Amino acid sequence: MINRRIIAKVHEALDRQAAVALIGPRQVGKTTLALAIAETRPSLYLDLEAMSDRNKLSDPELFLREHEDKLVILDEIHRVPELFQSLRGLIDQGRRKGKRTGRFLILGSAAIDLLRQSGETLAGRIDYVDMGPLDALEVDGSGAACNRLWLRGGFPDSFLAKSDTDSFLLRQSFIRTYLERDVPQFGPRIPAETLERLWTMLAHNQGGLLNASRLASGLSVSAPTVTSYVGLLVDLLLVRRLSPFHVNTGKRLVKSPKVYVRDSGLVHALLGIRSLNELAGHPVVGPSWEGFVIETLLAAAPEGAKASFYRTGAGAEIDLVIDLGGGIGLWAIEIKRGLSPKPERGFHHAREDLKPARSFLVYSGADRYPLAEGIEVIGLQELAQELAAF
């Protein structure tokens, strides 16, 4: 088992709150992590995809009251959304008896129904912890491991597969499962072929501005329909919409979000890229590296950090702006692949507009050195470590 950095955050949340929702895409390792937590305290695990476990909750208050001295882990909670109302009553009863923390660990594969249901019934009783795929701080620090993570993505089975071919086939199966089984559970009935084409188009346009009209013409649907489909992939934690940074600089700013398929391994599977050699010669290699860096840095960033990008109509641009708040200020991050990186002129102009507290150029190497006044060249893992230290 690869040690996940997030496990400490889950323990802290359980020691603070009655219910904790661990949210992340399917196959990201939520169940494995929950079972590891179960070994540290008296626990009961229920898989709500299994009919036998769902039957135990035919009278949830009666059954769960018998286990009020244990941490109850409820996996795939979206299968029984009506359970939230019962959980509220059980939490309130437990509080009256002095049992205020560590009652329920709820695992969910999407933000949609889980957040809405729990938001309606468990306000003030639940904490949320987001769990993503493996990141660069959770594998060994070698360049080979980082490249393997970039190629295969961070889903544990894919990353740990015996070969690149096995990893590729696992990711293709993952995509089919989402399209044919998981998406219909969470959203409106969408033809699997249409959604796969959209997902593939987003991978081809990795890191590009969202142009719903252009995507709609390629899918023979309306622009609002495309927007709703993209929103569904965002809610399923498979796609990231990176918002533009808005500031009153007197410049004409780009207003459309940039869109990334969040896991680089899924980008490559959607595009049929099986190896690092194939990736190196593919047009998506730069945008894929950019998305990989962004996901790694945002996974390491402290709670409450706000991420965006900056672009003006005149070409001033910063790939990633992280607002760390708390007197730390803005970090401007330019992302380049290769060992001799140089920022574009637009990066310098954007720095003049935003005046960030710190500016970095993230590249494929490991050395750290000053490039120009106020700009440091830095490797991905070292910058991620700096963010994780806050």
Image (cartoon, helix red, strand yellow):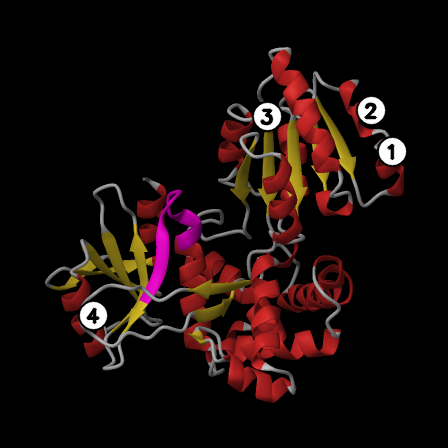
Q: Which label is found at residue 18?
A: 3
Residue 303 inside the magenta-drawn segment? yes
Whether pointer 2 and pointer 1 mark residues with C-beta atoms closer than 8 Å, the reply is yes
Q: Which residue is mark 4?
A: 350
Q: CA distance from mark 2 to mark 1?
A: 8 Å
- The amino acid sitting under disc 4 is Ala
**Residue sitting at 52 percent across and 72 percent down?**
276
User: Which residues make up the magenta segment?
Assistant: 298-309
- Residue 109 in view (yes/no): no
Say what secondary structure mark 1 lies in: loop
- The amino acid sitting under disc 2 is Phe
Numbered disc in front, either 2 or 4 = 2
- The amino acid sitting under disc 1 is Ser
Say what secondary structure mark 4 lies in: helix
Quarter-of-image position of residue 56:
top right
Left or right placement of residue 253 versus residue 262 in this view: left
User: Where is residue 55 shown, x and y percent of the image?
Assistant: 89, 36
Mark 4: few, some, or many residues within 10 Å (few <14, many ≥20)?
Answer: some
